[in-house]
Amino acid sequence: MSRNLLVQETSPYLLQHKDNPVHWRPWGPEALAEAQRDRKPILLSIGYSACHWCHVMAHESFENDSIAAVMNELFVNIKVDREERPDLDVIYQSALALMGEHGGWPLTMFLTSHGDPFWGGTYFPASPRFGRPAFPDVLRRVAELHRTEGEKIAQNVSAIRQALGKLAQPAGGDGLSGEALDSAARGALRLVDPIHGGTLGAPKFPQPSFFKFLWRAYKRTGSRVFREAVTTTLDAICQGGIYDHVGGGFARYSTDEHWLVPHFEKMLYDNALLIELMAEVWQDTGSPLYAIRVRETIDWALRDMRVVPGENAVGDSTPDLFAFASAFDADSEGVEGKYYVWSEEEIDSVLGADAPVFKEIYGVHSRGNWEGVNILNRSSFDGVSDDEREALLLRCRQKLLDVRGRRIPPLRDDKVLADWNGLMIAALAHAAMIFDEPAWLEAAKAAFTFVSRYMTEEGRLRHTWREGRLRHAAVLDDYANMARASLLLFEATGEAAYLDQAQAWVATANKRYWDGLSGGYFLTADDTDDVITRPKTIADNATPNGNGTMMEVLARLHYLTGTPAYRERAETLGQIFSGKSPEHHTNLPTLCNGFELLENAMQIVVVGDEHQETTGSLTRVAVEAAPPTRIIYRLTPDAQLPDGHPAQGKGLVNGMPAVYLCLGQTCGLPVTDPEDLRRQLAHL
């Protein structure tokens, strides 16, 4: 069949390529069967909608009739959205690394007709540039090698398959410990830029999971060097150009070491993770800057990333339900960042008499600060100004937002991903508790219901939803992130349904994803039949690793239910993924944070009528004053804790609400006065 077959796909990224002269196929058995029938190798191209270099390669090569003709003649061409199929991306990125090449996107891999990789790279220019060969020359050379060097390719395929299999069988280690976490944190400090924040050099990524690990090291040890590493980073990104000062939300990364010039795409996961980190750090610092950025980023997410079920949704449509879109592209009108930047003349025209103050604060110059235009930033100023000036700046930003709203916006990738939505739901629930914002909690509950209702099929989560269509089997991260979100909603509401749902999702993960031979969770389910191997990963990347997140989920469930099996499985994760060195642990911040919760959780059981003022005051103090390793259990007077819980049988004191602080299997005396609770928490 000689035509492009992407028109029936749901991914905005794949639909961007539906009119290419390349005869693209989606990944699936039909494409593999075609390659086997025609005895052709496969050209696999993996990217995502917000990827700038993916667009460049598309414009240069995939929209070029002559290059497309070469591709169509020599290969079966398959296009994959890495966000729809993270399992395929992990497999082929790992294969490229085994070949000694750096990974990235677009990923360009050459496969046998059975899907086995034998060579690859990332971006290839249409003509020789950047020290890289021209893409048409690469195509012809690879096709010739496939035709003439079959035995050598078969040997390479066999070696790569064996190596990929070994990646799913970690060597294990001595297990984790508090000393190992402290050693890893000290080692991680060597990677931190003490002046500009972030890690050393450029480009700079926010890396919220990494800096959350350092923040927890500060809370655990009291060492201010960890604190300063985190606050320096957050201060810089909150004031830098990586933050959208007009519309809210953070870009994916900065191309320079000063956080000025972003790669302008905005990803849901970055913003969710930064909301959660900033909220946690704000509890200690009280920084007005972090509070403002949390609120602005949540406002952006609720305004610009909202996706509603629509008339074609599966199930009964509920008007107040919504989920979150995946990303905004970096480009608009084919130009990176065009939607976000300003000339001095535009600022003067829009703001009039207020322009001089605004330009001073936001670094606006006649020559611009990037390619002749201005990226708004507040990097020259610490913190926030006085209330009067901030009110003026807010009015200015609103005027600019109104003007920007008339520009052609970048593409919004409006597919809903269960795992990324889990991150945002958890962030909203967490921030709602810390800032006492009921509206954020309601938003988290609405998005949670959306995923639970519209992204479940035959009792199992699916990975993607768009315009009423479910696609692709869930990966581990879907279950891990949604289970964690469910547990944070249970903490925020006390509603047992959230605890029950978390346990149900973990049961599915244990049944379908757990490696019964070596331990640990595979990324793909046991009935996923279109991958050449089942990857098992542990290192955090842009998002927290699923195995690391499961460590926290299992720890929370152990404490909340008293079930030893949850702890035993969490301890197994720590054992098999611990490795031998602190350097290894720095790549596992989510696993390490989950282990600390497992070992040092402080259970705070609040017993009382939720409508009673004292119950609310006690809960508020618990949220404000407890350490990050807290687990709050809200209990009505007539409810019972599960068997094995150290506070089982404890209840009201003389008819009054009470709090029980429990460490391990030991609980302290009941506390009935909020200020007494605050004092006790301060000394723990």
Image (spheres, helix red, strand yellow):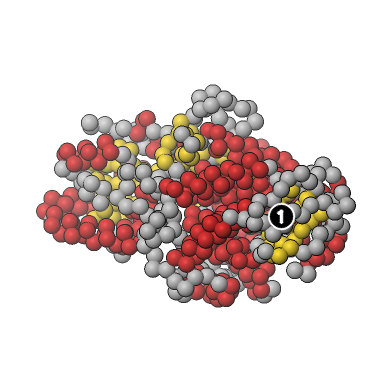
List the residue tagged with mark 1.
Answer: 648
Above or below, comparing residue 350 to residue 161 in the picture: above
Q: Residue at x 58, y 50 (%)?
A: 484
Q: Tag 1, which secondary structure? A: loop
Question: Which image quarter is the N terminus in?
Answer: top left
Of 464 and 603, the residue lying toward us? 603
Q: Mark 1 is on which residue type?
A: Gln
In the rendered image, the residue lying farthest to the top is 311
In the rendered image, the residue lying farthest to the left is 148
Relative image position of residue 405 (x, y in whole percent): 61, 36
Q: Residue at x 72, y 57 (%)?
A: 647
Relative image position of residue 321 (x, y in whole percent): 62, 32
Relative image position of residue 235 (x, y in whole percent): 66, 62
Q: Residue at x 78, y 46 (%)?
A: 637
- Category of crowding for the residue at label 1, using alpha-carbon neighbours closer than 10 angstroms: few (below 14), some (14–19), many (at least 20): few
Q: Is residue 219 left or right of residue 92?
A: right
Image quadrant of residue 320?
top right
Question: Which image quarter is the C terminus in?
Answer: bottom right
Above or below, comparing residue 64 to residue 317 in the picture: below
Of 17 and 456, the residue lying toward us? 456
Q: Is residue 163 visible?
A: yes
Q: Is residue 248 visible?
A: no
Tally the marks.
1
Relative image position of residue 382 (x, y in whole percent): 71, 63
Q: Is residue 62 left or right of residue 500?
A: left
Q: Residue at x 63, y 27 (%)?
A: 319
